[in-house]
Image (cartoon, grey):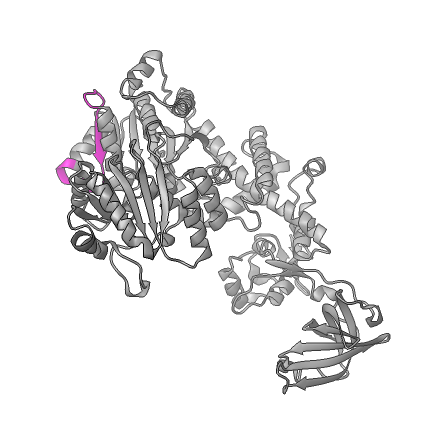
């Protein structure tokens, strides 16, 4: 505990409410709350967005052109020349060595502020005007005769401000806390570790991030604080993983040669090398009592479903049940159909359990699941409902993990601890895999199975639209099918020229493609209607499916070889890549046509990489750089605290080091009980709270 602020007798620590810092009070505390600052600790972590470095005061006679300088002198005269084409306010400032001309363009606001006889400190760049030294638009502050201000007034951090709090006010308030960092900030690591890692002390880092003496010191402060932020994130993930591994027990699922052969006979093709590698990792995990916690990622059409079904059949062969959870009813239905196709005439029992199932049918399904009569249950979030109880749940498979929260994943593992396999067709850059999914082991299918046709992607401008329609018509005449995807279900006045699915369906079916069967599909339709349309499209009774992004994941129609995405500039890269993944599922060549007209550089960048690359991992890396991790995975989704200073993209080297050190610490002191780790544990709980169940770490 320490005292903060002049004439203050209140004892402070990092958890003290910010309102008790001198210069804050209740009203400003409310403003700070809008900036995410509630405590003294938050205030210290309210980092500048930029930094100014101002040199010590120089004498006017020493000034050289192009130097950035600080001078202190007396205002000799002032003049506002409003009649000029570019009006300016002029002052002459002198010290005991010379005179300097000061000019502020459009500086009429300075009339009444600056007057002859005032002592002033200025900081700016030196130029020459008619052989006279001049500062143009410098920063300045008026001084009393005792020089109450120093160059520090201009130096240091520039803070993100808001209505009611300027950057300078924030800086002044933070300076009162910064001066007490020696007492407030604990050091996490011993001196030998800091030297090995090339890190400065934590107290110095907090002092210098707000008021660095030079660029080099600022870089050292940033590096230390970035490391700490990444270390605490990785430590939270390491602890979460440790708790699953050591405080939970799953039913081990052994895989004999006979079981392996029986499962593989279900697939009418040879598995790829990537699929076999992933299966080997899953089999090794499921053979242990320690619950599997694995992420299976692979590009669209890479064969993840087959790997997941192998894991499911392994669990069933070991007399346990399997829950497969998908984000939408369409995707759940798609998984169920795939399973039906592979398990036709099998003794394995399976059920589809979604929100659309009601009354007697639902009761029968729940009874079958609860008694163990059903081996595999496929569903949506309906599987999380309280009345869904399994007799012996051995494996949970979660598809499209990015559409579920961490809490939802944990929900399925509350009563028992099954093995857990998380799948995603959204390729995840290594940096995100180490953060948002850092508590999971990762298996990757990088190559698609043989027999997949190439997918050609083209960006179609408005004047080429008719040519594109003619091309699509030829593909449809060749008995192929097409998707038309729109960003909206219905038109909205404020949306300008954004095309909508319902309007365009009418246009396509009556004017553009009247000779073909065109159907409409969107998320607001009743479940039964959606299933009917998808079934007819799958059977080839529908030539063109007009839809919203409801077809983004899980729809598998090999005969569909054309994907038209209207308003493609309005979709994110991940969505564009997912939509493109609906085609190219047979040996036939497929075509993805991006209809878009935009001047937005970011949108252009997205469209260009889509035409250049079909590699989901390359596209995901590009997306990460364009949008950043915050947008790709929100805090609500990945259950991690936001990063305030570190970047998982730009600070990857630090992330790798922090991850290694965090996991090593948990292996040495799993519950952080040692006295020397007390401060790290406190900081960890402050960061995560109960988000990943750390409060019970004793």
Left or right: 621 as drawn, with respect to 566: right
Left or right: 261 as drawn, with respect to 60: left
Residue 649 in percent (x, y) is at: 54, 44
Taking 354 as reference, is 318 above or below it? above
Question: Which residue is drawn at the image coordinates 54% and 37% (left, top)?
Answer: 235
Residue 661 in percent (x, y) is at: 60, 34
In the rendered image, the residue lying farthest to the right is 97
Highlighted range, magenta: 344-361
In the rendered image, the residue lying farthest to the bottom is 83
Left or right: 292 as drawn, with respect to 128: left
Left or right: 332 as drawn, with respect to 25: left
Tell me if residue 355 is in the magenta stretch.
Answer: yes
Residue 315 lies in quadrant: top left
Taking 367 as reference, is 81 above or below it? below
Residue 277 in percent (x, y) is at: 42, 23
User: What predominant SS class does the magenta segment belong to?
Assistant: loop
């Amino acid at each position: 505990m320490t005292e903060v602020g002049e004439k203050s007798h209140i004892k402070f620590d990092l958890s003290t409410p910010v309102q008790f810092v001198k210069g804050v009070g209740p009203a400003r505390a409310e403003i700070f709350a809008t900036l995410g600052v509630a405590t003294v600790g938050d205030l210290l972590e309210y980092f500048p967005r930029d930094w100014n470095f101002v040199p010590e005061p120089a004498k006017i006679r020493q000034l050289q052109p192009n130097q950035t300088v600080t001078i202190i002198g007396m205002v000799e005269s002032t003049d506002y020349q409003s009649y000029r084409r570019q009006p300016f306010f002029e002052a002459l400032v002198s010290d005991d060595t010379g005179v300097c001309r000061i000019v502020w363009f459009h500086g009429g606001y300075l009339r009444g502020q600056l007057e002859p006889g005032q002592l002033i400190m200025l900081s700016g760049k030196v130029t020459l005007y008619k052989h006279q030294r001049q500062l143009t638009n410098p920063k300045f502050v008026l001084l009393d005769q005792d020089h109450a201000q120093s160059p520090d007034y201009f130096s240091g951090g520039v803070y993100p401000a808001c209505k009611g709090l300027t950057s300078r006010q924030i800086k002044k308030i933070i300076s009162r806390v910064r001066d007490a960092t020696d007492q407030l900030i604990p050091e996490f690591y011993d001196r030998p570790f800091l030297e090995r890692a090339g890190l400065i002390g934590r107290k110095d880092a907090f002092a210098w991030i707000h008021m660095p003496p030079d660029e080099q010191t600022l870089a050292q402060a940033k590096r230390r604080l970035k490391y700490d932020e990444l270390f605490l994130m990785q430590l939270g993930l390491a602890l979460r993983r440790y708790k699953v591994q050591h405080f939970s027990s799953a039913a081990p699922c052994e895989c004999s040669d006979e079981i392996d052969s029986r499962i593989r006979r279900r697939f009418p093709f040879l598995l790829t090398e990537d699929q076999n590698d992933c299966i080997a990792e899953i089999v090794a995990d499921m053979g242990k009592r320690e619950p599997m916690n694995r992420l299976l990622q692979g590009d669209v059409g890479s064969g993840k479903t087959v790997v997941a079904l192998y894991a499911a059949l392994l669990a069933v062969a070991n007399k346990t049940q399997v829950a497969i959870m998908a984000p939408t009813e369409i995707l759940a239905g798609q998984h169920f159909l795939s399973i039906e196709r592979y398990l036709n005439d099998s003794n394995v029992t399976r059920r589809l359990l979604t929100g659309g199932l009601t009354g007697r049918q639902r009761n029968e399904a729940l009874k079958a699941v609860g008694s163990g009569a059903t081996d595999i249950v496929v569903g949506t979030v309906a599987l999380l409902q309280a009345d869904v109880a399994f007799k012996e749940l051995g494996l949970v498979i979660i598809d499209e993990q990015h559409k579920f929260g961490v809490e939802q994943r944990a929900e399925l593992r509350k009563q028992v601890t099954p093995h857990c396999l998380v799948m995603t067709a959204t390729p995840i850059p290594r940096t995100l895999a180490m953060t948002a999914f850092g508590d999971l082991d990762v298996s990757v299918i990088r190559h698609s199975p043989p027999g997949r046709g190439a997918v050609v992607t083209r960006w179609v401008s408005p004047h080429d639209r008719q040519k594109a329609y003619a091309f699509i018509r030829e593909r449809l005449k060749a008995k192929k099918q097409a998707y038309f995807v729109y960003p909206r279900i219905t038109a909205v006045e404020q949306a300008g020229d954004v095309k909508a699915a319902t309007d365009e369906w009418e246009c396509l079916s009556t004017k553009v493609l009247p000779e073909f069967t065109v159907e409409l599909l969107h998320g607001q339709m009743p479940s039964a209607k959606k299933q009917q349309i998808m079934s007819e499209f799958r059977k080839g009774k529908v030539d063109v499916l007009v839809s919203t992004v409801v077809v983004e994941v899980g729809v598998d129609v090999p005969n569909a070889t054309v994907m038209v995405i209207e308003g493609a500039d309005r979709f994110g890269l991940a969505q564009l890549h997912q939509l493109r993944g609906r085609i190219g599922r047979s040996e036939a060549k497929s075509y993805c046509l991006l209809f878009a007209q935009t001047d937005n550089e970011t949108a252009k960048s997205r469209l260009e990489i889509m035409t250049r690359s079909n590699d989901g991992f390359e596209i995901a890396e590009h997306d990460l750089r364009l949008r950043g991790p915050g947008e790709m995975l929100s805090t609500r989704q990945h259950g991690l605290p936001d990063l305030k200073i570190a970047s998982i993209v730009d600070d990857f080297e630090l992330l790798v080091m922090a991850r290694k050190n965090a996991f090593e610490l948990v292996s040495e002191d799993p519950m952080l009980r040692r006295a020397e780790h007390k401060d790290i544990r406190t900081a960890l709980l402050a960061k995560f709270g109960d988000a990943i169940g750390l409060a019970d770490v004793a």
